[in-house]
Image (cartoon, rainbow, N blue to C red):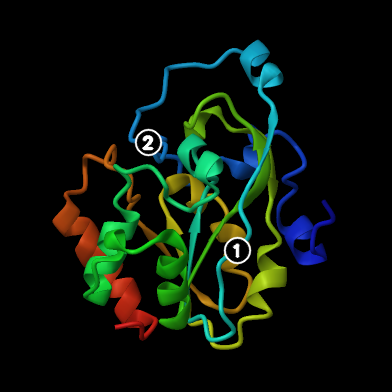
Amino acid sequence: IELHPQCAKALNYRQARRAPALRCERAPDRSDNGDMPCSSHSDSVHLAAPVLRGLAPIVHPGCRLLVLGSFPGQASLQAQQYYAHPRNQFWPLVGDLFGLDLMRLPYALRIEVVRERGLGIWDVYAQCRRAGSLDSAIVDAQPNDLPGLIVRLPALRLVAHNGSESARAMRITRSLGVEVCRLPSTSPANASWSLERKRAAWREAFVAANLI
């Protein structure tokens, strides 16, 4: 993967994600299946894990809010759909903010709806090795070309990082001339935030980006 020069300069993701440059805003990791991380993961398990590749961005030229996750969980990779695990609160929360029951729509139609309303979806990592779905198990992560995407979104008002692992890339997104915020993870394992508090925080981002 050839990195955008600004991205490569800002942070060398070609090193293992244990590199000191990535150790920012660390919080308890959570996967999109709601599991809490194990206390440790052996190097042998990491090395045995296959290289996983993420999903293509969902964007529209009129995108005003770009939500960045970390990397798709197992359910999302298997389905080739963002936030595919049924316990992840992303789609119900977004649907609630838009006043729509997105969960009743086929995935392809959901994507069409959010794109037309100015919401974009992507992840900070393009590929990695990971045993299971936990963010804490991610190693050898390589970034998506965030600068290359953002420069193609002239209407973009806000980049929102969904959770602590995604927020580790804020040093990159903050350098790209657009407002950036960190949102509480939509994982149900984020027990310190009630659904109501999550909705309130996400609503602020949607309002700031003029989505609602």
Name the one closer to the observer, 174 or 203.
203
Q: Indicate whether 167 appears above or below 175.
A: above
Three-letter residue code for mark 1: Pro
93 lies left or right of 24: left
Q: Which mark is residue 33?
A: 2
Location of residue 185 in the rendering, given as x and y in whole percent from the top left corner: 35, 50
11 lies left or right of 173: right
Q: Indicate whether 153 appears above or below 89.
A: below
Q: Which mark is residue 205?
A: none
Name the one closer to the observer, 146 or 32.
32
Task: Say which residue appears at 55% left-offset and 42% top-offset.
Answer: 77
Task: Say which residue appears at 59% left-offset and 84% top-offset.
Answer: 61
Report if residue 189 is visible in the image: yes
Task: Say which residue appears at 67% left-offset and 11% top-offset.
Answer: 44
Location of residue 57 in the rendering, given as x and y in whole percent from the top left corner: 60, 63
Q: Please tell me whether mark 2 sits on a helix, a strand or a loop.
A: loop
Name the one closer to the observer, 138 or 118.
118
Location of residue 177 in the rendering, given as x and y in whole percent from the top left corner: 60, 79
Between discs 1 and 2, the one toward the N terminus: 2
Residue 178 lies in what quarter of the image? bottom right
Q: Indicate whether 168 appears above or below 137.
A: below
The 10 Å Cα crowd at callout 1, few under 14, some 14 to 19, many 20 or more, is some
The 10 Å Cα crowd at callout 2, few under 14, some 14 to 19, many 20 or more, is many
What is the distance, in whole Å, between disc 1 and disc 2 at their CAs?
21 Å
**Tag 1 residue:** 57
Number of callouts: 2
Three-letter residue code for mark 2: Asn
Location of residue 117 in the rendering, given as x and y in whole percent from the top left corner: 41, 81
Q: Please tell me whether mark 1 sits on a helix, a strand or a loop.
A: loop
Q: Indicate whether 144 appears above or below 53.
A: below
Looking at the rendered image, the quarter that the C terminus falls into is bottom left
